[in-house]
Image (spheres, rainbow, N blue to C red):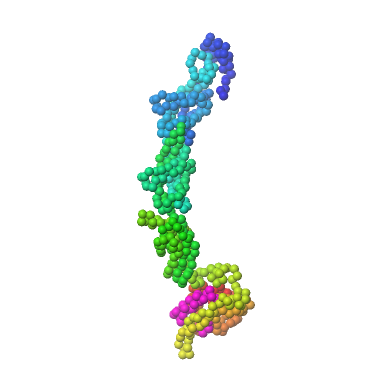
Amino acid sequence: MIKLKKRLLLPIIFALAGLAVALPGAVATDDPDPPPAMVENLEAFLSPGGIALTWDTVSGADGYEVFRSRSLSGDFELLEPELMGAEYTDSAIEYGIRYFYKVRAYRLEANIVPEEPHDLPSDIFVRVYGDESEPADAVFTLGNTKITSIVTAKHRALTVTWDPVDNVHFYEVTRSDTQNGTYKKISTVQGTSFINEKLTTSVYYFYRVIPCVEFQGKIGRGGTNTLRGRALLEEIDISSIKAVKPKILEIKWKRNKYADGYRVYRSTKAKGPFKRISTIKNNKTTSFKAKKQKHGKLYYYIVRAYKTVNSTRVLGLSAHPRDAWMDYYGHRNETLARKQRRVFKSTKNTWYSTRSSSWRNMKRITVKVWSIDKKGRKYTRRVGVTVHKKLAKTVSKIFLEIYNGKEKFPMHTVWGYNWRTTSTGGRSEHSIGTAIDINPRENYMIRNGKIVAGSFWRPTKNRYSIKRNGDVVRAFRKYGFVWGGDWVTAKDYMHFSYFGR
Ligand SMILES: [Zn+2]
């Protein structure tokens, strides 16, 4: 509302009474107020609503008029005749047209000179104008969209992401099969990303994202970069890696029916580099046997699907590598849990409570060992030993390596399974067939200075005594066994056990 000043009341009464005509000079000399000051600092800038104008508030002004022209020297038409605040947004614009603006302030004064023409809604007041501002101009154009990334979203889909454009109302996402082809609008989007689904995997699509504004029912469009992307085949999940032979790991994975084949990669480090070890040229074969794997070594595998596009193999996404020990036999880095699973198939119930339940899991194996005849010559002898069936291959391998060793270590006694208690009253690991004694007499067990079993241990003098780092200890250790000679509280030099007790 216009605030009336008290000094205006008298002239109003004059005006109503028709006396103003008779007294023109009286009020003019009564009123010392000058016109409002010129509008200063008019600025025009873009906003989502159109071209916004701001200027400095003029003290004493009752309102402002905004004028607009399409050229600086052209006719400025009155755009807004009655504006209270010192800001205005022109949304009656066309995209790409430069507009020039001027603003002037006015003060309302009683109409004491009615013969002067004016365009006020009331004929009570006249406007006393300040000078027009300096012109300000602006043209509404949008910046360019910058598409920043196009990545595989999920199966047969791409996520297109771009930086926001100032003052935009929405974006038109367009796509073409070739860079310079025809781009068709595939979606209108408010945000700054879009998921394009149901694509053909592994082929390139080209995207342009056009920023748009709409004024007066017409759409104005900015520019865009072009970026291509392709939806890659999904990651292949390796379902299992298993040691199926002493030097062979079998890798199995889930089929991807969209693939033309798979590639298998291997590394000895989690972060690679990964080397391709196989290409499988169909999607139905979902396993591969990696050969020449080293015993007791940790490997990392990745399987990637591929699709052939224009005779090029386009690889699918890469999953995280899956690791596996070459653990056909037990090995020195084997965890307790892995050992328990190897022997008992689980990490629970890792013992046998009765002799018969243990016996059912035993296996008799025959191994070659060196013996010494009465003339002191070494010869090969075969001895039988009963061990847990799950360790039969491991124990056979250990004895083979000892037999093939340079020492040609002689054995006159080899004991395996034996349902018995230990010297301290617990049940011996021999009871579950996972411990082996060799040459007990020459490799005694000693606790607190007392000999518990056997007679002595003289590894430098007696050929039947087991040397600390000899072939026997190294072979057992290599395949996951612990030597009783390495124990701390007691020493049991004849004794090798898988679980270390
Ligand atoms: Zn023993």
For the point 43% across and 49% down, the residue is 150
Q: Is residue 117 depicted above or below 231 in this figure?
A: above
Q: Please state if 395 lies on the left or on the right of 75 as rendered.
A: right
**How many marks do you count on the picture?**
0
Visible residue check, residue 296: no
For the point 48% across and 14% down, the residue is 116
The picture places residue 388, in percent across and down from the top left corner, at 55, 76
Q: Quadrant of the N terminus?
A: top right
Visible residue check, residue 499: yes
For the point 58% across and 16% down, the residue is 9
Which residue is farthest right?
A: 425
Q: Is residue 22 depicted above or below 349 in this figure?
A: above
Which residue is farthest top?
A: 22
For the point 54% across and 78% down, the residue is 363
Which range of residues does the magenta coloring cover? Answer: 388-414
Q: Please state if 491 lies on the left or on the right of 372 as rendered.
A: right
The picture places residue 416, in percent across and down from the top left corner, at 55, 79
Observer-nearest residue: 255 or 349?
255
Q: Quadrant of the C terminus?
A: bottom right
Q: Is residue 31 depicted above or below 84 in this figure?
A: above
Observer-nearest residue: 237 or 59?
237
Observer-nearest residue: 307 or 316?
307
The picture places residue 371, in percent across and down from the top left corner, at 48, 85
The picture places residue 42, in percent across and down from the top left corner, at 46, 29
* Magenta span includes 7: no
